[in-house]
Amino acid sequence: LHTLAEAFTVVRFVREKGWGELVIIAPAFHLLRCFLSAVTAARHEFPALRVYAEVGVMQDWHEHAVHSQKTTHGLRKDLIIGEIRRVLKYQEEGTPVPLCSTKDALEYLEWRDKR
């Protein structure tokens, strides 16, 4: 399991339910990758879906946290570096598809917010 695979599962579920919007909630340090994953899945599985992102309960940046299927440990503030590295890596070589680019995500936001 990984964030992108989970995003594809959630987007398929949302499509089956006939919902038009999805709000994802994640810890602040993980929110960017969660959002990019959801946008990637939406673009492939349900292009009409509007995806929004919210930070979950704010937690102390200086507390220890467990992340990435319990394989990564550290202070929340330090986990951001790993998240950025993952985003860049998965944008190049992600599976099942590469994570959408920053440019694509910004274009998606422009589309999403036009009403």
Image: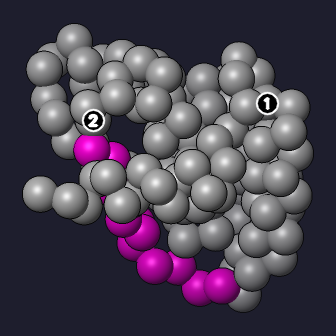
Q: Is 98 situated left or right of 74 in this image?
A: left
Up the image or down, 67 lies above or below 71; here it is: below
Front in this rendered view, residue 54 or 38? 38
The residue indicated by pointer 1 is: 94
What is the crowding at mark 1: few (fewer than 14 residues within 10 Å), some, or many (at least 20)?
Answer: some
- Classify the position of the N terminus by image quarter: top right
- Classify the position of the C terminus by image quarter: bottom left
Q: Which mark is residue 49?
A: 2
User: Is residue 113 at all visible to an observer of this figure?
Assistant: yes
Hey, what amino acid is under mark 2?
Answer: Leu
- Magenta region includes residue 53: yes
Give the residue at the far top of this rendering. 16
Q: Quadrant of residue 43?
A: top left
- Magenta region includes residue 37: no
User: Is residue 71 at all visible to an observer of this figure?
Assistant: no
Q: Is 84 situated left or right of 65 in this image?
A: right
Proximity of marks 2 and 1: CB atoms separated by less than 8 Å: no
What is the crowding at mark 2: few (fewer than 14 residues within 10 Å), some, or many (at least 20)?
Answer: many
Front in this rendered view, residue 10 or 113? 113
Identify the element where label 2 is drawn. loop
Q: Distance of mark 2 from mark 1, alpha carbons?
A: 22 Å
Span highlighted in magenta in the image: 50-61
Q: Position of residue 93 (x, y in %)?
A: 86, 31
